[in-house]
Image: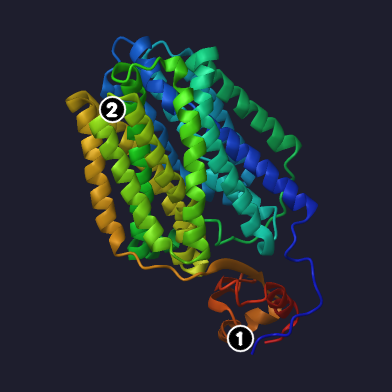
Amino acid sequence: MRATAPQPIDDLAMLPDEKRAASLMAALYASRMLGMFMILPTFALFAQGEFTNATALMIGLTIGIYGLTQAMLQLPFGMWSDKIGRKPVIALGLVLFAIGSVVCALAPSLEWMLVGRALQGAGAISAVLMALLADLTRETVRLRAMSLVGMTIGLSFTVSLVAGPALDSVIGVRGIFWLTALMAIVGLIVLYTLVPNPQPKYFSRDVQADTSSLGIVLRDKALLRLNFGIFSLHLLLTALFIAVPLALVQSAGLDKMDHWMVYLPVMLVSFALMVPFIIIGEKRAKLRPVFLISIALIGLSEAILWDGHDTLWLVTLGLLVFFTGFNVMEASLPSLIAKFAPAHLKGTASGVYATSQFLGSFVGGVLGGALLGWGGFDAIFAAAVLLTLVWFAVAWGMGNPDRLSSFVLPLTIAHAQDLVATTQALMEIEGVREAWVDEIGLRAYMKIDRSLVDEAALIHWAASKEV
């Protein structure tokens, strides 16, 4: 039977310290994302003009190597931070990123540029930053704090694709690397002067990866589809920026200093076009058809670029269609991971998802460079169309997820005395669809229907109900 709602309580409101922590984590994330993406629209042209041995494959490998070291170190850094603390690992990651940026800024050859990019990626602290955010926020407001970080990541991506070409025209690509090194140093200062020292907490399964449960996540068909999706999406993104900057100059005849005039309207309009898709997907529970339409849009964009890479307005149209689908995917895929992952394995599922994303960036760089060197623009865009067809076929079997949200509920010691009874009691509350009780961390990981459940009453039940 549903618990009676108590007088209004403030458990669902973020405290000032939590807002500050979320804002600081978002700023640190933003600095990393800007450093990662600002060179995407500019690097291929820079490398081709700067280095005599700049083959398409080598350019692609240099762009993509960042993703490989990110993928290799994301989970290990997260586990290491569980043992020695968040701040030392984050600091190491920022130092590695700064050193890599300096190496790139001074690189006398493309080989040294490759080393610098690998070092940049070795600062794989995304998972650690999210774990620190979990340490600094209560379970009941954590989703809101993570949403703030997620919005910042999306905004940073949009800004970086416009700012990269604009900055290139002023300070050059080497100047952009110096700027990202400076941003990493500022991040270090912020980390140790403004970010609070977290109190030790139990393992947070909604954020941190449990390596003992990797097998469960890797065998889940729904999650595998989504992981293939984010892998394909970032493969296509990286390959796109190996080909498009060169096509704009070599085929469409647009000076590289003017590329921002293409990217700016494309990103603004595609962002506006994304909003109706997200509303339909989330508010009307139509995520599956929106997901499939987005893949189709990305495939259509690659077909437009394949046919029209020598015409400026067709390249612009192709980019607009691509980023409309891309932005929808970037906004909806994390939500789908949370909806399909078991309540207590969301952190593990998110870790595998992030690793898949970075692997996609690496493969996109290598494969995109190889295809461009072998068959030119036609080869890279034709392969992209083929991949989207495979992706569409893989995604077709995805079910439409229920309108559920993740929710973490703090428990009392009394609830841990009888896990079966506690779980059963939680499942009997209206709007609760899934519950898993962590007896060590004294919390319940749940899937809830927010249109039915009274979250304040649920919190009150956990604080007062005797099992």
**The N terminus - image quarter:** bottom right
Q: Is any part of residue 197 visible from this angle?
A: no
Q: Residue 301: in sight, yes or no?
A: yes
Three-letter amino acid code of the residue under disc 1: Ala
Q: Secondary structure at mark 1?
A: helix
Q: Is residue 261 above or below residue 335?
A: above
Residue 90 position by quadrant:
top right
Category of crowding for the residue at label 2, using alpha-carbon neighbours closer than 10 angstroms: few (below 14), some (14–19), many (at least 20): many
In which quadrant will I find the C terminus? bottom right
Which residue is under mark 2? 309
Residue 173 horizontal/vertical position (percent)? 48, 17
Q: Which residue carries the number 1 mark?
A: 425
Q: In terms of secondary structure, where does tag 2 sit? A: loop
Q: Looking at numbered disc 2 in the image, what kind of residue is underneath it? A: His
The image shows residue 255, relative to residue 94, as above or below, that is above
Q: Residue at x 60, y 47 (%)?
A: 149
Residue at the far bottom in the pictured view: 1
Q: Position of residue 218 (x, y in %)?
A: 35, 60
Q: Is residue 28 above or below residue 75?
A: above
In this rendering, is residue 344 above or below 373?
below
Point out the frontmost of discs 2 and 1. 2
Q: Identify which residue is drawn at 55% across, 85% down.
A: 420
User: Camera-side residue: 440 or 166?
Assistant: 166
Q: Nearer the viewer, residue 289 or 22?
A: 289
Mark 2 and mark 1 lie on one chain; the one further toward the N terminus is 2
Distance from the alpha carbon under mark 2 to that under mark 1:
60 Å
- Give percent across and percent down for residue 402: 46, 71
Q: Residue furthest right?
A: 7
**Residue 97 picture location, percent across and down:** 53, 29
Frontmost residue, 368 versus 106: 368
Q: Is residue 31 left or right of residue 47?
A: right
